[in-house]
Image: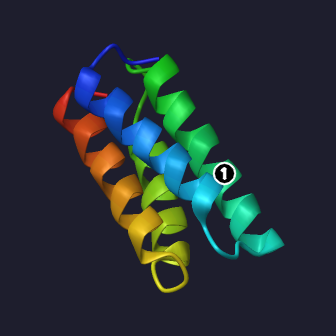
């Protein structure tokens, strides 16, 4: 995992929001799991071609924007922070 304290804090916030979300459908849970997998892969393989994973991450975020705007915003911040660190 990234040692960047900002990214770590964002991931903690995201985890907190997920645990405290009022309602999360099975579909949204699957999307969040995919998002987590994409983020983990970006962190674990920073040297790999990031374009396909970044595109998948952005698509997953777009899927949840209307139903979970706070979670989508946090995921956008995580994606941006990862990008800023070269991941």
User: Looking at this view, is 17 or 77 the one in front?
Assistant: 17
Q: Is residue 62 left or right of residue 82?
A: right
Q: What residue is at 42 percent from the left and 61 percent from the top?
A: 58
List the single residue furthest toward the right. Answer: 26
* Position of the C terminus by quadrant: top left
User: Looking at this view, is 8 or 62 the one in front?
Assistant: 8
Q: Position of residue 9 (x, y in %)?
A: 33, 33
Q: Is residue 84 left or right of residue 62?
A: left
From the viewer's perspective, is residue 28 above or below residue 43? below
User: Looking at this view, is 48 or 13 the one in front?
Assistant: 13
List the single residue furthest toward the bottom. Answer: 66
List the single residue furthest toward the left. Answer: 84
Task: Name the image quarter holding residue 63.
Answer: bottom right
Q: Position of residue 75 (x, y in %)?
A: 41, 54
Q: Position of residue 70 (x, y in %)?
A: 40, 69
Packing grade of label 1 (10 A; few <14, some 14-19, many >=20) is: some
Q: What residue is at 35 percent from the left and 41 percent from the top?
A: 10
Q: What residue is at 73 percent from the left and 62 percent from the top?
A: 29
Q: What residue is at 47 percent from the left and 49 percent from the top?
A: 14
From the viewer's perspective, is residue 75 above or below residue 1? below
From the viewer's perspective, is residue 70 above or below residue 55? below
> Which color mode does the image show?
rainbow
Question: On the image, numbered disc 1 is attached to which residue?
Answer: 34
At numbered mark 1, what does the secondary structure look like: helix, strand or loop? helix
Q: Position of residue 32 (x, y in %)?
A: 64, 56
Task: Name the image quarter holding residue 67.
Answer: bottom right
From the viewer's perspective, is residue 65 above or below residue 54? below
Number of residue marks: 1
């Amino acid at each position: 995992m990234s040692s960047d304290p900002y990214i770590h804090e964002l991931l903690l916030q995201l985890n907190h929001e997920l645990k405290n979300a009022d309602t999360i459908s099975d579909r949204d849970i699957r999307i969040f799991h995919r998002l987590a997998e994409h983020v983990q892969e970006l962190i674990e393989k920073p040297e790999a071609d990031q374009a396909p994973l970044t595109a998948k991450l952005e698509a997953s975020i777009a899927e949840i924007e209307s139903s979970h705007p706070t979670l989508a915003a946090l995921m956008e911040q995580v994606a941006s922070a990862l990008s800023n660190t070269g991941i």
